[in-house]
Structures are given as C-alpha cells and as structure tokens.
Image (spheres, coloured by chain):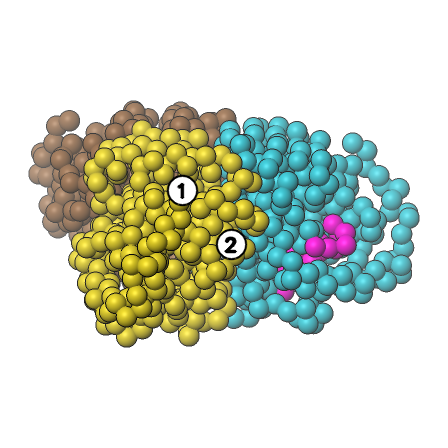
Chain colours: A cyan, B yellow, C brown
Amino acid sequence: MNHPESLNTLVNQNSLSDLAAPLLQQIAEAWTALQTQQPLVHIITNGVANNYTANVLLAAGASPAMIDNPFEAESFAAIASAVSINLGMPTTEQMQAMQIAAQTAQRLDKPWVLDPVGYGPVLPWRSEMTQQLLQYTPSVIRGNASEISALAGNQVQSKGVDSTLDSAEIYQQAVPLLEHTACIAISGESDFILSKDLNAVIQINGGSHLQPKITASGCALGALIAAYCAVSPSVTAGTAAAHVHFAIAGKLAFEKAQAVGSFNVAFLDELFNLKADSIQQYADIQILPL
Amino acid sequence: MNHPESLNTLVNQNSLSDLAAPLLQQIAEAWTALQTQQPLVHIITNGVANNYTANVLLAAGASPAMIDNPFEAESFAAIASAVSINLGMPTTEQMQAMQIAAQTAQRLDKPWVLDPVGYGPVLPWRSEMTQQLLQYTPSVIRGNASEISALAGNQVQSKGVDSTLDSAEIYQQAVPLLEHTACIAISGESDFILSKDLNAVIQINGGSHLQPKITASGCALGALIAAYCAVSPSVTAGTAAAHVHFAIAGKLAFEKAQAVGSFNVAFLDELFNLKADSIQQYADIQILPL
Amino acid sequence: MNHPESLNTLVNQNSLSDLAAPLLQQIAEAWTALQTQQPLVHIITNGVANNYTANVLLAAGASPAMIDNPFEAESFAAIASAVSINLGMPTTEQMQAMQIAAQTAQRLDKPWVLDPVGYGPVLPWRSEMTQQLLQYTPSVIRGNASEISALAGNQVQSKGVDSTLDSAEIYQQAVPLLEHTACIAISGESDFILSKDLNAVIQINGGSHLQPKITASGCALGALIAAYCAVSPSVTAGTAAAHVHFAIAGKLAFEKAQAVGSFNVAFLDELFNLKADSIQQYADIQILPL
C-alpha cells in the first residue's frame, strides 16, 4: 500500500470550507430520509453490541435485523438496504456469515460497513478475516484510532478493544486504506472521516467524554453508518450523518446526565429526539485536506 | 390446513362479553401466583433478547434461565415450569437445543411457547425449523402480525424482524394455526389472542407506540407468556395475563417518559410495580368471536 | 476433599477485628489503582451478561474485552491483566476458549476468576467443565450460595441460575474448596469471602434486595473481581474491593430508586461515582473466623 500523499496537493483550504454547508444540508436530508424510509439494515455484530445496536438504530429511525448465521446471510443481505459487519466476538458460524453477507452486498451494490474490532496481531483470527473481507470492497471502514492505525499497517499496542491512540494524531495514517474503500471513519474525541469522493477529511466534534465508557457505542455507530448510507446521496454524506447524529445526541445527553447509567439513557433519548433542525443548530464539522 | 370458519357460528357477542370479567379475575390471580411461585422458565432466545428478556421476567416476578446448548436442554427443560423458544438469531447448537427442549416440554406436558421470529422465505433455515417445532405442539404461538400471517401460509413482504402488517387486519388469518396450538398471540397496536378453549379472540389494548422502538420487547413478551402459563389455570389465561401485564406497564411508562431510553427504564419499573389492583383498574380487554 | 476445621482454631475474634482496618485501606488503594491502571480484563461470559458486564467494568474503572473464541484465547489471555470465566451459557467454542484462557492465566501467573453458574447435576455439561477448570487453580471462585454449596459437594435443589440458599447459612460449606483456590466469594444478602491467606472470612454487608432482580449482576461482579485482583496486593483484597464497590453502589442506588429499571441505571451511576472516600465512609465489613 502506498500512501497517496500527492492527494494533499489537490485541495486547498478555501475550497474545503465551501464543502461544509452543502454537506450539512445533505446530512439533514439524510436524517429525514432515515425517518421516512426506515431502511432495513442487515447486522452481524458481537454479543456485547447486539441489543444496544438494535436499540440505537430503532431510536435513530432505522430498522435493524441481526442475522448472523451462514444459512440465511445471503438471502437476507439481498433484501436489506445495507449491511454492517463487526468483528467484535466472532464465532465460526458468524465468520462464514460475514463473508457471505459482504460478498452479497458487493455483488448487489449495497452499501456495507466493516468494523474491524480489535484488529492486530494479538487477535489473529479476526484480523485474517478482516483482510479477507477487504476484498469485497467495504463502502466504509470504521473503527477507533488503534484499530484503523493497525489496519493501515502500523504497530499498535493493544489494549483489547479500546483505543490507546488519539484519532486526531493518526487519521492521516489511514489514507492508504482508501485503496480498499471509499470512506474511512475514525471515532474518538473528535471523529475523522476520510472521503475519497470528497477528497477531504471531515472532522466532527461533539459527543461526550463518557461515550467510551458506554460499551458498544462504536459498534452501534458502525451499524448506524450503514443505515444512513442506505438513504444518502453518497457514502460520505451517510457516514457523516451517522457521526453527526451521534455527536449531537452525546453532547445533549451529557448536558442532562454526567454519570454513565443515566447518560446512556439520555443518549438513547437524544438519538430519538433529534430533529433536522437540531442538526443545523448543533452540528460542529470542519473540512480538512486529505 | 382448513380454515375452521364454522367456529364463528358457535359463539355470539352476548355470551362473549360475559367472558371478560372471569378472565380478568383469572389474570389478576395469575399475577399473584407469578409473584408467589416465581416459576422457573427455560428460555432459548436470541442474542438481542437474552439480557432484556431476563430482566423483564425478573421485573415481572418470574425466574428466567437461558439454557441454549443441546447437552443440557433435556435435563433443564425437565425441571423448568415452562419453556420459551425464540428463533431470532439461531445457531446450529441452539437449533438442536430447541428441538430437544420442545420435545421434552411436550413429553412432560409442560407449557411451551414458540416465537417464530422472522418466519418467511427470506429466512428459510429458521422457517424450516419452525415447521419442525410445530410437531411438538406448542402451547402458544406468539409473534407479530407479519410472522403469524406468514406462518399461516400467507405471502408477506419481509421487513426483517419488524412487522409490515397490522394485527387487527390479519388476526383472522391465524385461525388455521389453531390446528397446531391451543393459543395464538399476535402483538401489535392492539394485541389479539386466539383461544381454542375459549373459542374466542381476546383483544388487549394499551401499551405504547414506543414499544416497537424497544428491541426484543416482543421476544421478552413470549418468555413472559411461558412464565404465566406455568401458574395459570389455562394457556389462554396465562397468555392474556402476560399481554395485560405488558400493556398496562407500557401505558403507565409512556405517561412517565416519551423518549425511548427513559421509556424503557420506566417500562421495567412499571412491570415491577404492577399490583393485582392495577390489573383490575387498567386492563382493557374485549372478547371477539373467533 | 477434607474439611480443614482445624483452621478455626488458629484465629480468635480479637486478632480478626484487627484485620478490618488494614483491609479497608487496601480496598481504597485498590480502587485508586483501578482508576489509574484501568486493567485489561479478558472475559468469557454468557449472552445475558456480555453487555452488562462490560458496562459495569467500564463504570467501575476497568477495561473489559470479551474474547470467547478458542483461536484467540491464548494470545489474548497473555496480554490481559486478568481473566474472568463464567459458565452461564456455554457453547462448544466457548468451552474450548475457557480451557485455553484458564490454562494460559495459570501458566503466566495472572489472576483468574471462575464463576460456576448453574453448577449441579441438572446442568452436567458445564459442571464437568467446571471440574476440569479447577485443575488450573482459579485465583478466586465466586458464585451464589447454591452454586458454591453444590460445587463443594452438597446436594442442592436447582432453581436454574438463581440461588435457593442463603449465603450466611452455607458459607462454611465452602471451606473444602480452598483446596482449589485462594479465595471463595459467595454473594447474597450478605457476601462472604473465604480467604486462605487471611485465614478468615470477610462478611460484606450493603447492596440492595433489588440486586438479584437485575440479571447478570453476579456475573458482572465476577469480572470486576478479576479486574480488582489485577491491581491489588492480594486476591483477598481484590475480591473484597470488588464486593465493597458493588455493595456501596447498590446501597446508594437504592436510596435513589426503588424499582428495577431505574435502580439499575442508578447502580451504574453509583459504580461510576464511587470515590476512595466513599469506601471509607460506607464500607460495612466484618472479619469472621474461617
């Protein structure tokens, strides 16, 4: 993988800031489309995330379905509007289902999201599978800073499934991964979305420092990205919409509750209460050069 | 399967309304029995529903145990007071356990509930298993309108595990399924319970439009039906009691909280706080001809 | 297994009460160490407990990771600070992972906790595995009164995974299990910790009668014991610290909320809000002869 640093020379800061307003407009429209279309998302995720992910998608407006056996993965991916694959706690049957679902999504040109949870040498089984899944060209790869940095080929000290790195410091390391996908989303204190079609990086601020204290919130975000991609004009807009939805809900939830239990309840409430207006009011995004 | 339309001629509206008061009495008694006996329910359910179902049953007064491996399914079903089988996210081992548990329940004459999540041609593996499980004569079949309509042989457009149909419009389609079970429960805006022994349909109003926004609430209801059947004079009374318990808790929870996160917390609180008195006060049931 | 009753003669009540103050000091220091070190805990647990356990550990200050496949269990146990193994809903793959993780923990001298959920003749598959796991010398065995009594060789009437016995009445039955472990923790209305190195029993009061109404709270406690053992001077201190953290959070949560849904939210809040000062203020422990 070569780092396409030359891309940096293609954009300049002025033209970049012009991209923010239309993107925000697309995000608000994507939110409306999510409410009206309630896209069916085929989700293969882990035992920590199943319930929470389903509740997050229902709160946000989508229709989740967890189908993770290899005998139904093809027929279900074929009727779903998007597919979300998360490697958090794989079983042998899930691994088979993941390949089938990813292949089906690619074949039928449906958006699909890859979340390479725990990628790295300490967890070789899933890491090999993640490499295999890359051949099906995920629409979006999303993860925390450690996972994305490791997937981009860097040596990262593993702290299990939590990140030891800062998204702001490593997002540029992810550029080579654009060989495999149109869009890379890195969650952290600020979120960074590397977009091939925008040829830029979207930085999204907001959320709360309590978010990493709620298990599976990143996993749920991955599935929400898939949902938004199903109703958005581009995977970039869809990915940004999911992140903005999360960031605003997290920010407003923290204003209501500062401890993890009640914050999580408030977060689901705010995901549910968000309106298109709130997006225009609260979204905090910046466009950076790739 | 023949549609036994002739049953409709056996009842009339007058005699039906006479059934409501004694049924309500049985429901209140079932609630008391649930609190005192805390029946052990053997539950095989899906990864989205496991935690929530257990918490719902504990809140309502029952004692849940998730035993879903084939090596312990027979011995555990044999000591449980009821069995609940849900096809939401089957694994190969779960599929084996389901057959063993259903067979054991039938052999030992224990009530068991079948929840055919996602039944239909898009999910053939579970649908074949559902057909096989019918041979063990479930005490109750419960599902949403899409699942029950599909199981009754109708073509239904799949939206994953959520219903695309209205329970009020399809409950009569479920009559042929009474060949396989004593009781069919269809959840929706209103719930409909088709009872062979009552030769009538029980309509239960209440709940909240937020209920379908809480994942696995239908799955948890299925397990609660099993719990109530273990302590009720009939599967009809047990099934109705579980639905009434849910409907009242949902209604009271919505008075407290109108967003999904806090609604769900309030719902568990209200399941827990329900008293026999509240059943008499809030239950909203009607008896209709079959 | 011989019951080492002679141990009782080695201690007297005076010297025992002298042990409480230094233990409390160790517990407060363990809490601080948990916050600063955020130990990575390798957890293999059941489908009911996965999400809740992760959220409990994050709230309390630890870093949980659920890795339950046999292909990654060894490499992950090797980098984790502690291992927690719970037999609540085993699958064939999990069973293999449990053996590998336990063996690795023993080989690398890392603390590991065994939670023999449902141990007894009604659930023979897990019970055989539990016996096999004992050969890897768990640092701590924790369970409810029924499970510990059954594991110590007594006949216990099974009520699934809930206890039918009182911890205060059976804790002395657990003494023979000290042949296999340094520490046995029995949760109940009061918790009892049998410590080989202290040669005493620690009784911990507090919590709430609602705790058994929250599913998987015992399972989550087991994983929290593992987390604390990773940062404590002894497994006794670590085990006591986890129990005290739970007991205080449960007590304070019940002051805020008396129904199960809101109690559970408050419980997570209080796990998160606990400070070293609160431990000194609220901990209610007594030292008893072994």
Give the residues in magenta: A231-248
What residue is shown with label 1?
B1
Q: Residue at x 12, y 50 (%)?
A: C14
Residues indicated by labels 1 and 2 sit on the same polypeptide chain: yes
Q: Residue at x 42, y 56 (%)?
A: B172
Q: Are marks 1 and 2 in contact (CB under 8 Å)?
A: no
Which corner quadrant holds the N terminus of chain C? top left
Label 2 amino acid?
Ser
Position of C249 compared to A94: left or right?
Answer: left
Q: Residues within 10 Å of mark 2 (few under 14, many from 20)?
A: many
State whether residue A263 appears in this view. no
Which corner quadrant holds the C terminus of chain C? top left
The chain identifier of the residue carrying mark 2 reads B
**Quarter of the view holding residue A179:** top right
Q: Which mark is residue C180?
A: none
What residue is shown with label 2?
B163
Position of A190 compared to B112: left or right?
Answer: right
Question: Residue A129 placed where, x, y %?
Answer: 61, 30
Q: Residue at x 71, y 31 (%)?
A: A135
**Quarter of the view holding residue C181:** top left
Q: Could you say whether the residue bearing mark 2 is in a helix, strand or loop?
A: loop
- Viewer-closest of B81 and C72: B81
Q: Residues within 10 Å of mark 1 (few under 14, many from 20)?
A: few
